[in-house]
Image (cartoon, coloured by chain):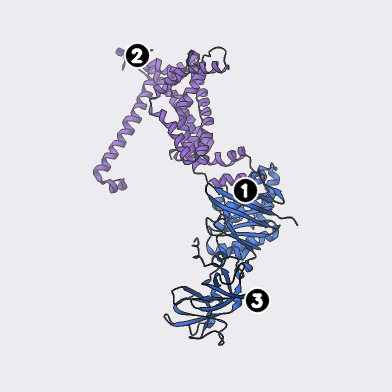
Chain colours: A purple, B blue
C-alpha cells in the first residue's frame, strides 16, 4: 500500500485501488454470489417472488442429480473435456519441445506466427471454418475420397468434430505455457542424458517433462476449463448425440426460461472446474503461484 | 598397445569456416590428455566430435580402434563432463550418479549400491539423498565426475569443468581430478583454455589455434621447446625479439636483431637468411651490469633496455622494461636478487644464455587475448 503510494502518488494509487476493488467486487464476486443466490431459489412467477414460496433449497441441484439425460451429459462433458485436454497435450508437447530446443530461431518465429494468425479471427468464425471443412459434402470428405481412403462421405459432426474443433481452438493455451517451461531447460541436460546412454523416451520422461511440469499443468488446467465451458464448438460441430453441458445451461436460460435451474447447473460446472484445477495442481505438485507465472 | 582415442585427419566445417582443420592425434589408454587453446580454437568442437554430438565433415574418429562414424553419443564408450556440469536438479544426488545405469536397465538395488561406491570414491558418502542445489561448487563437480564414471567409460571427456570455480577450489580440484584419473585408469580427454591447468595435470597437451593443431607434447617439452610461434607465445609468458638468421651451427642459431646479435637454440624449420624470432622466458632473463656487452662475464646475449616498473609478487618480482624501439620486455627476478633493483627509468641490461632461448621461423604474432 505504502509502496504503491510511494511509487505513483496518492491520486494514482487510490485510482488503482478503486479499480481493482471494483473489478474484484463488481465483476468477480457479485455475479458469482448472484448465481449462487439464483441457484438456490425456486423458479417462481414474478408475483410470488419474495412471497412465502421463495425459500432457499437444494431442489435445483437435486433436479440435475435426478435427471438421467442431463447427468449423463454432465459426466460426458467431464471426460470429453479431459480427452480434449489429453489430445491437445499430445499435439502440443512435441511442437513445444521442437520450438524450444531444436528449431532455428527463424523457423521457430515462422511457426509461431503461423499458429497465432488464426487467432486474430473470432472463435466463432474459426469454428465455422471447421464446420465447412468437415461438412458432409465438404473438402475433407472430397479429399479422402479422392485418395481412395473413403468410398463414400463420412459424417464428421459429432464427437470427432467437436474434438478436432476444440483441440484447434485451444492449442495456444497449451502450447505457450509448455514452450516457456521447456525453453528454460538447459540444453546440456538433454545432451548429458543422451551421453549417459538414455533413449529419447527416457530423456523426456525423466528430464524434460519433470522440468516442464508447471507449464504442462498450466496448459492442462487452461485447456480443461476452456473445453468444459465451451459452447461454440459443440453447438456448431456437434451432433444430437454429442451435446455439451453448456448447451443444457444455455437452454435453461434462453429456451426453458428457468434461470434458477440454469444457475444451479452453471454452479455445478464451476465447482467441477475448480476441483479439476486443484486436483491437477496436487497431482503435478505445482503451487498456484507457479501457474500464475 | 592400441590407442584409446585417435583422430585421423579430422575436419569440421561450419559453412565457410573450418572450426577444425585437418587435425590428427592419438591418445594412449590411461593418459591424461589435454587440448589447450584460446576460445574459438576448435577444441570444444573436437570434444563434441569424440562424444558423438557432431559428425566430422571429413576424417575419422576412432575409440579403441573402432570407427565411431554413425554412432550417437548414447552408443559410444565415452562420458562427458559438461562445462555447466548439467546435473539433473530434480533428482537426488544418487539418482544423478546412477542415471547412466538406469538408462542401461540396471536394477534399482544395484544402481543404489554402485552410487554408494562412487560416493565413497568422491568422498561424499552419505550425500546420496541430498538435492543438487544443496551441494557446494566443488561437491557438484565431484558428483558430475561420479555420474560420468558410473557408466565405466573408456574415455572421460571434460569440457572446461573447472572454469566456474574460484581459484583455490580450482587448484584443489586439479589435484583431485588427477588422483581420480590415476585411481580409475580411465583415459581423460580434457579441454581447457587455462594453460596452467593443462600444464599441471596433463601427461600430454595438444595446443590448438584457429582450428589447426600446433603441437602435441608433454607439458615440459611444450614450455621448453615450442614448435611454433603460437605455442611459444601462448604457453607461458615470453619475450619475443624479431630478427634474421645469420647462421645455424650445431643446433644453435645466430640472429641479427635491432638490438644486436643473439644466439639461441634453433627451432624446427629455421633456415639461414630467413626471418626468425627469438623467444626467451621471463625467468631466463637476469639483470646484467649496466653497459655490459656480450662475453664479459654476462653470458653470450645481452639486451639493453630501460626499466619501467617492478611488480612484487612474493617469490618473484616482475620487472617490466622496454627496449629502445619500444618493445615490451618482462623479466621474472627471484626476490632474493631484488636488493639492488633498478629504479623506474634506469638504463639496464638483461642477459640470457643460449640454451634458454629458442629461435623459430617467422615474425611473432601478438599474444592472443586470454579468457578471464
The residue mark sitting in front, 1 or 2, is 1
Q: Residue B58 has which mark?
A: 1
The residue mark sitting in front, 3 or 1, is 3
Residue B123, placed above or below residue B233:
above
Where does residue B174 sit, x and y in percent of width and height? 60, 62
Q: Residue A44 has which mark?
A: 2
Q: Chain of mark 2?
A: A
Element assignment for label 3? loop
Q: CA distance from mark 3 to mark 1?
A: 41 Å
Q: Are marks 1 and 2 on the same chain?
A: no
Tag 2–tag 3 contact (CB < 8 Å): no
Element assignment for label 1? strand
Q: Is residue B268 visible?
A: yes
Element assignment for label 2? loop
Q: Residue furthest bottom?
A: B296
Give the image quarter of residue A169: top left
Q: CA distance from mark 1 to mark 2?
A: 86 Å
B207 left or right, relative to A92: right
A193 or B266, which is in the foreground? Answer: B266
B245 left or right, relative to B123: left
Q: Residues within 10 Å of mark 2 (few under 14, many from 20)?
A: some
Residue behind mark 3: B250
From the image, which quarter does the C terminus of chain A lie in?
Answer: top left
Q: CA distance from mark 2 to mark 3?
A: 120 Å
B355 or B259, which is in the foreground? Answer: B259
Q: Residue furthest front?
A: B273
Amino acid at each position: 500500500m505504502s509502496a504503491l503510494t510511494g511509487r505513483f502518488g496518492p491520486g494514482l494509487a487510490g485510482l488503482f485501488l478503486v479499480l481493482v476493488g471494483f473489478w474484484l467486487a463488481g465483476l468477480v464476486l457479485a455475479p458469482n454470489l448472484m448465481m449462487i443466490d439464483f441457484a438456490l431459489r425456486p423458479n417462481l412467477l414474478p408475483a410470488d417472488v419474495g412471497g412465502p414460496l421463495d425459500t432457499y433449497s437444494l431442489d435445483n441441484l437435486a433436479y440435475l442429480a435426478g435427471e438421467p439425460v442431463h447427468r449423463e451429459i454432465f459426466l460426458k462433458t467431464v471426460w470429453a473435456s479431459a480427452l480434449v485436454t489429453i489430445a491437445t497435450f499430445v499435439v502440443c508437447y512435441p511442437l513445444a519441445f521442437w520450438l524450444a530446443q531444436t528449431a532455428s530461431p527463424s523457423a521457430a518465429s515462422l511457426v509461431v506466427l503461423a499458429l497465432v494468425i488464426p487467432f486474430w479471427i473470432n472463435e466463432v468464425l474459426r469454428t465455422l471454418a471447421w464446420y465447412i471443412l468437415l461438412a458432409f459434402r465438404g473438402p475433407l470428405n472430397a479429399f479422402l475420397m479422392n485418395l481412395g481412403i473413403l468410398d463414400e462421405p463420412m459424417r464428421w459432426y459429432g464427437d470427432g468434430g467437436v474434438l478436432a474443433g476444440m483441440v484447434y481452438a485451444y492449442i495456444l493455451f497449451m502450447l505457450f505455457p509448455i514452450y516457456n517451461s521447456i525453453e528454460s531447460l538447459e540444453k546440456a541436460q538433454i545432451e548429458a542424458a543422451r551421453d549417459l546412454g538414455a533413449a529419447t523416451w527416457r530423456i523426456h520422461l525423466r528430464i524434460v517433462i519433470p522440468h516442464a511440469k508447471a507449464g504442462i499443468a498450466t496448459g492442462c488446467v487452461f485447456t480443461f476449463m476452456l473445453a468444459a465451458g465451451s459452447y461454440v464448438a459443440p453447438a456448431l460441430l456437434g451432433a444430437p448425440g454429442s451435446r455439451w453441458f453448456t448447451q443444457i445451461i444455455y437452454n435453461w436460460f434462453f429456451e426453458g426460461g428457468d434461470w434458477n435451474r440454469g444457475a444451479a447447473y452453471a454452479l455445478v460446472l464451476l465447482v467441477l472446474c475448480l476441483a479439476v484445477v486443484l486436483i491437477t495442481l496436487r497431482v503435478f505438485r505445482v503451487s498456484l503461484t507457479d501457474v500464475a507465472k | 598397445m592400441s590407442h584409446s582415442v585417435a583422430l585421423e585427419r579430422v575436419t569440421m566445417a561450419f559453412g565457410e569456416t573450418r572450426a577444425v582443420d585437418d587435425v590428427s592425434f592419438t591418445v594412449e589408454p590411461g593418459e591424461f590428455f589435454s587440448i589447450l587453446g584460446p576460445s574459438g580454437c576448435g577444441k570444444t568442437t573436437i570434444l563434441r566430435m569424440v562424444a558423438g554430438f557432431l559428425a566430422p565433415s571429413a576424417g575419422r574418429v576412432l575409440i579403441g580402434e573402432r570407427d565411431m562414424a554413425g554412432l550417437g553419443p548414447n552408443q559410444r564408450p565415452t562420458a562427458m563432463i559438461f562445462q555447466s556440469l548439467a546435473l539433473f536438479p530434480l533428482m537426488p544426488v544418487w539418482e544423478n550418479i546412477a542415471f547412466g545405469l538406469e538408462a542401461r536397465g540396471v536394477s534399482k538395488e544395484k544402481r543404489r549400491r554402485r552410487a554408494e561406491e562412487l560416493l565413497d570414491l568422491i568422498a561424499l558418502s552419505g550425500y546420496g539423498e541430498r538435492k543438487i542445489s544443496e551441494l557446494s561448487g566443488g561437491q557438484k563437480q565431484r558428483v558430475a565426475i561420479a555420474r560420468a564414471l558410473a557408466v565405466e567409460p573408456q574415455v572421460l571427456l571434460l569440457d572446461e569443468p573447472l572454469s566456474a570455480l574460484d581459484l583455490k577450489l580450482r587448484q584443489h580440484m586439479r589435484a583431485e581430478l588427477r588422483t581420480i584419473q590415476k585411481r580409475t585408469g580411465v583415459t581423460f580427454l580434457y579441454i581447457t583454455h587455462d594453460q596452467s591447468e593443462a600444464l599441471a595435470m596433463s601427461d600430454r597437451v595438444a595446443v590448438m589455434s584457429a582450428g589447426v593443431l600446433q603441437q602435441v607434447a608433454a607439458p615440459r617439452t611444450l614450455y621448453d621447446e615450442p614448435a611454433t610461434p603460437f605455442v611459444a607465445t601462448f604457453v607461458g609468458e615470453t619475450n619475443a625479439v624479431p630478427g634474421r638468421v645469420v647462421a645455424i651451427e650445431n643446433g644453435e642459431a645466430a640472429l641479427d636483431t635491432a638490438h644486436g646479435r643473439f644466439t639461441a637454440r634453433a627451432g624446427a624449420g629455421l633456415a639461414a637468411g630467413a626471418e626468425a624470432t627469438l623467444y626467451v622466458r621471463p625467468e631466463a632473463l637476469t639483470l646484467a651490469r649496466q653497459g655490459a656487452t656480450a662475453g664479459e662475464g654476462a653470458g653470450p646475449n645481452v639486451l639493453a633496455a630501460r626499466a619501467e616498473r617492478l611488480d612484487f609478487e612474493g617469490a618473484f618480482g616482475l620487472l617490466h622494461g622496454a627496449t629502445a624501439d619500444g618493445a615490451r620486455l618482462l623479466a621474472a627476478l627471484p626476490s632474493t636478487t631484488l636488493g639492488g633493483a633498478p629504479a623506474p627509468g634506469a638504463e639496464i641490461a638483461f642477459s640470457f644464455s643460449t640454451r634458454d632461448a629458442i629461435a623459430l621461423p617467422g615474425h611473432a604474432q601478438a599474444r592472443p587475448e586470454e579468457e578471464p
